[in-house]
Image (cartoon, helix red, strand yellow):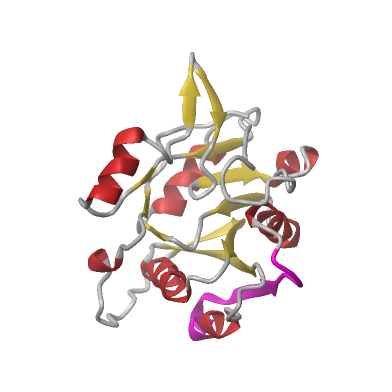
Amino acid sequence: LSSSSAASDVYKRQDFMSIQAKENLPVLNRQRTISDVSLVLPCYGRVSQTKDLLQSIRRANFRCELILVDDCSPEPLSSVANDFADLEIRYLRNGKNSGAAFSRNVGAQAASNSLIAFTDNDCIVDEDWLIKLHDALTKSPVSVACVGGKVVASGSDLYSAYYDYHKTLDPWFFRGKFYYLTTANAIFRKAVFNLVDGFDESVPGAGGEDPG
């Protein structure tokens, strides 16, 4: 699978509340509808952070199909989805806790569109994130199956600095080849995704289920 690190960043760290605007500012009517993308959000718990993610999507310059897959969270996330009714979220809940790979595959199979993007519920997205990700893939040759970018920390604390310094959430590029993308910041052609049977569900945790 091919990829590009040129796509816009997603911001991720354990505590990113400090960079979130607290005011309920009006959303300007400037969104670009990306009709060929389904954005899948695998979620387990993290109610507050899930709200932060959805708030960042609400403020973003894009709109697309949103699929929130609740991996049988102890506190169902349906009420969170309902709080963001303007985003028209498709809410799916697994019957049992089955892991990130399973949840991503559930969302991908439910997707209505030809391109599938992913991010996680401990992330917030840049305003133009999905636009840049989408354009990077659609302007690439059809032989490019997916595109991804870096996931960078939002703050300057020690935890964030560690992740950024070690490039823990960067796509792995070695000897001229990308070996995997970070699924918190990636988009795939659905036809190719299905051809390889999606993510490896034998990996129960997040990380390692998404090699190219």
Q: Say above or below: 77 vs 19.
A: below
Q: How many labels does the image show?
A: 0
As for residue 44 lying within the magenta part, the answer is no
Q: Say above or below: 21 vs 42.
A: below
Quarter residue 210 falls in: top right
Name the one closer to the observer, 203 or 30: 203
Q: Kindly give the residue lying farthest to the left in the view shown.
A: 156
As for residue 96 lying within the magenta part, the answer is yes
Spot occupied by residue 80 in the image (x, y as percentages of width and height): 52, 81
Spot occupied by residue 35 in the image (x, y as percentages of width and height): 59, 59
Quadrant the N terminus occupies? top right
The residue lying at 51 percent from left, 42 percent from top is 182
Spot occupied by residue 18 in the image (x, y as percentages of width and height): 23, 67
Q: What stretch is highlighted in magenta?
A: 83-97
Name the one closer to the observer, 188 or 163: 163
The residue lying at 76 percent from left, 72 percent from top is 95
Quadrant the C terminus occupies? top right
Quarter residue 191 falls in: top right
Spot occupied by residue 14 in the image (x, y as percentages of width and height): 36, 59
Name the one closer to the observer, 10 or 127: 10
Is 174 on the left-hand or right-hand side of 116?
A: left
The residue lying at 58 percent from left, 28 percent from top is 2
The residue lying at 68 percent from left, 59 percent from top is 103
